[in-house]
Amino acid sequence: MPPRTGGVALQRKTERNAASQTEVPIEHVGVEPVPEKDRTATAKDFFQIAFGAAVATTTIIIGTIPIALGLSFWAAASAIVVGVIAGAFLLSPLAVVGSRTHTNNAVSSGAHFGVRGRVIGSFLSLLIAITFFMISVWVGGDAMTAGLARLFPELEGDLLSAAGYALTAAVIFTVCVVGYRWLLAANRFIAPLVVALLVLGAIAFMGDFDPSFAGAPDSYAFGTFAATWVAAMLIAMANPMSYGPFLGDWSRYVPSSVEAKKLRRAIFGAQLVSLVPFLFGAATATLVPDAGNYINGLVAVAPAWYVAALVVVAVAGGIAGGVASLYGTGLDFSSLVPAVSRIKGTLLIGTLAIALVFVGRFAIDMVDTVNSFLTLILIFAAPWTAIMLVGMLTRRSFYDSEDLQVFNRGQSGGRYWFTNGMNYRAVGSWTIGSVLGLMLANTTLFTGPLSGIADGIDVSFFVALAVTVAVYWVSLRLFPEPRYVFDERGPRHVPALDADPPPVTAERSGARSE
C-alpha cells in the first residue's frame, strides 16, 4: 500500500551529489539521524510526500473490501469515511515526532518504550510492511496477468497468476536492494499515474456505476449489518493508522523549527485526499462479479481503451507501494540485528511476505488474509499509538535524538535506558492492551475468546486503545518517570522522580535501574 520511506523531494539534491561522487549503486545507509545540513524540508514537502502515499493503488484495493464483505455502496462509503477521519485524527500528532528526533518513528518510540523496548515499534513496522507488501504483490500480479489473459484467454490460470506475483516481487526486491535513488525514481511518478487512473476510471465506468448497489444483506461476512459495518470501518481506519511507525521516515527531513500544527495539518489533509481512491475502489467493486477478485474482474469489465492504462497504473502502484513499505522496514530490521545488513533484512522480510501471498491467494483466501492482517495492525497499533500520544503529551514533545541511538550504536545508558533498556510502564501497558485486543478480535480467519462480548461486533481496537491509555496513565502516576526524560519545563500532568541519567557506555552492560 502506501509509500513510507524517507523524503522523496526532500533529498534529491543530496542524492544527485552523492551519485556524482561515487559509482557504487547499492545504498547502505541506516537509521541514524539525518545530518543538520540535509534538514531542508518544509511542511509543503511533507504534504506532497504524504499525498503521494495516500493515493497509492493499495488504498483503492482496501476500498473494495467493504463491498467484498457484503455492504451496500452507501454503507461501505460511510464506513470508509468514518474510518479514515478517525484514523487521521489519531495519526496526525505523530507527524511531529520525526522532525524532533530526525530518525524514524520506530526508533523514536524508544523515548517512551526504552531504547530496547522500541522493538515493539519495529515489530509493528514489520507487520505493516508484510501486509502492504502482500497487497502490493497481489495487485501488481493480478493486474499484469489479467491484462495478458484478456488479450490471450488461453493463458488464464493459476500458473499465470503465480508468475505475475513472482515477477512483481522480483521487481520490488530489486528496487529495494539498490536503494534510495531507485526508490525516489519509483515514487516520483506514482501519484500522477494514480490520479490519471482515477480520472480515466471515472470516465470509463461512469455509465455503469449504480450508487443504489445493495450489496449482499443475506450473507454479510460477519453475520449482521452492524458487525460487518464496524469491521469495514476498522479496515478503513487501518490505512491511516498503518502510517504511524513510518511518518518519521518523511518528517525527519523537516527542521525542528517548523511549527507542529503545520505538520499535523499536512498529514490530516493527505489522509482526507485518500478518500478519493478509497471511494473509487468501493464504487468500482460494485461493477465486478466478485469483489474478492477485484483486479481481474475490473480488467474484464473495463472498456478496451482503458485496459492498458488500468494495468500499467495498477502494476506501477503495486510496485511503488511494496517498495516503500519493504524498504523502510529493511532499514529498521538491520538496526535491530547488526549481523543482518539492510539488503539481507530486506530479502528476508520480503521472502516471508511473498510466501504469505501464495498461501493467502491459493490456499486460503486473499481478502480474508488481508482483512485479518489489517485487524492485527489495528490491535497492535492501538496501544502503541496510545502510548506515543500520552508520552508526547506528558513530555511536551521533547526528545533527545542522540540518546535514542544508544541501542543502534551498541551502547547502554542515556536518558532512555530506564531498566536494562526497557520502560516497563509503556511495555507493560502495550502488552495488556494488545492481549486484550486479541481476546476481543473478530475476523474472518480467527476470533478471540471474548469476541462475542458485543454481539459479534469487533470492539478490539476501541477497548485496546482505551485500556492502554488508562493503564499507562495510572502507571505514570504510581511509578513516576525520572525527571531527566523531560525538558527543563518538567512533566505535564504527571509527577517525576529526581534521578541522574546513567552514563552512556561503549558496550551494553547488565540490568541497569533508573
Image (cartoon, rainbow, N blue to C red):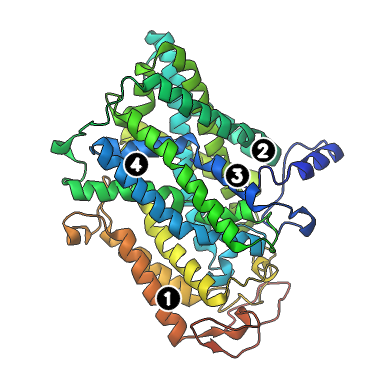
Residue 19 in which image quadrant = top right
Label for residue 369? 4
Q: Please tell me which residue is depicted at 26% across the width and 60% down the height of the picture.
A: 440
Q: Quadrant of the C terminus?
A: bottom right
Amino acid beneath label 3: Ile
Q: What is the distance, in whole Å, between disc 3 and disc 4 at their CAs?
A: 29 Å
Amino acid beneath label 1: Tyr
Q: What is the distance, in whole Å, between disc 1 and disc 2 at their CAs?
A: 39 Å
- Secondary structure under tag 3 reads helix
Q: Please tell me which residue is depicted at 35% across the width and 68% down the height of the picture.
A: 466
| Residues tagged 1 and 2 counted as in contact (Cβ below 8 A) | no
Q: What is the distance, in whole Å, between disc 3 and disc 1 at their CAs?
A: 33 Å
**Relative horizontal placement of residue 160, taking residue 252 as reference (left or right):** left
Q: Which residue is mark 1?
A: 472
| Residues tagged 4 and 1 counted as in contact (Cβ below 8 A) | no
Q: Which residue is mark 3?
A: 49
Figure check: 147 above or below 399: above
- Secondary structure under tag 4 reads helix
Label for residue 184? 2
Mark 3 vs mark 4: in front: 3
Compare marks 3 and 4 and give the one earlier in the sequence: 3
